[in-house]
Image (cartoon, rainbow, N blue to C red):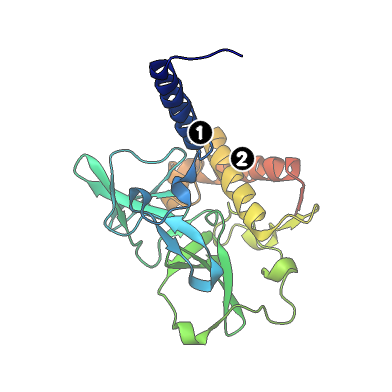
Amino acid sequence: MSKHHPAQCTLLAAVAALAVSFSVADERPGDHREREDHHGYVLDQRFHHNRYYPPRGFVVHALPRGFATIRWPGGEFFFSDGTWYSRSGPDFLVVAPPPGVTIAALPLGYTTVWLRGRPYYYADDVYYTQEPDGYAVVEAPSESDIVTTPPPGAGPRGGPPPQPAAGGAPGTGAEDFYIYPKDGQSDAQQGTDRYECHRWASTQTGFDPTQPAGGVPPQQASQKRADYRRAMSACLEARGYTVK
């Protein structure tokens, strides 16, 4: 049996303790989303939503990857995973979006609630309703009037009936553009797929239905809208949806 000098034993014990501390640290990757105080994020537990968001007034130096730019008469907004930002000098400030501003697809992990039989979609203290050209921010209804149990006739998993896919606009036939999940995709997964397909279709065609006239010259709007709808259909069908 080997024997160690007391000084060597002390050194070995210190090295072992250091190795254990590194091991414990390595076992906790990505836990910043699980702690309310990390980076100032807070947990939204309303309606059992249970997701973390930066609070209003929170400042970031750079926007998250994959953000969407939303132009509105009152200014320019940036949207990412349920959080809204506006410019604040060289930085970006977390803000509450104005009622009426519209997004093409719901944020990830939204929660469906009901008001007088109509579905409302909730995330980060913001309520949305479905409109012909996407999902519009609305004034917060009274919580005493909201229920979380879907009424008879609601869609699967407590969600609404099959939804028109993003990409239409009033008078363009958006009413007959529906998606049906063939593989039992959850509401959250449907929202993810709609949003990601919208981003891809917009990039491919240059048409964004959340922008006035799709963000293209008026003389190109009709053709670009048709291109966008074809791209959306192809993307959604590839992800396991029937598109009509």
| Residue lying at the far right of the rendered structure | 182
Whether residue 80 is visible to the viewer of this picture, yes or no, is yes
Residue at image point 47% right, 39% down: 66
- As drawn, 32 above or below 140: above
Q: Amino acid at mark 2?
A: Asp
- As drawn, 131 above or below 34: below
- As drawn, 30 above or below 194: above
Name the residue nearer the viewer: 146 or 29: 29
Name the residue nearer the viewer: 45 or 203: 45
For label 1, the residue is: 26
Alpha-carbon neighbours of circle 2 within 10 Å: few (<14), some, or many (≥20)? some
Q: From the viewer's perspective, is 128 left or right of 86?
A: right
Residue at image point 43% right, 50% down: 211
| Cα gap from disc 2 to disc 1, whole angstroms | 48 Å
| Number of the front mark, 2 or 1 | 1
- As drawn, 77 above or below 27: below
Name the quadrant of the N terminus: top right
Closer to the chain start, of discs 2 and 1, is 1
Alpha-carbon neighbours of circle 1 within 10 Å: few (<14), some, or many (≥20)? few
At which x and y percent is residue 18? Answer: 43, 28
Q: Quadrant of residue 159?
A: bottom right
Residue at image point 18% right, 43% down: 89
At which x and y percent is residue 240? Answer: 77, 46
Q: Amino acid at mark 1?
A: Asp
Q: From the viewer's perspective, is 184 left or right of 40?
A: right
At which x and y percent is residue 175? Answer: 65, 63
Number of numbered markers: 2
For label 2, the residue is: 227
Instruction: Label 2: state its secondary structure.
Output: helix
Instruction: Label 1: state its secondary structure.
Output: helix
Q: From the viewer's perspective, is 198 left or right of 157?
A: left
Per the rendering, the mark at residue 52 is none
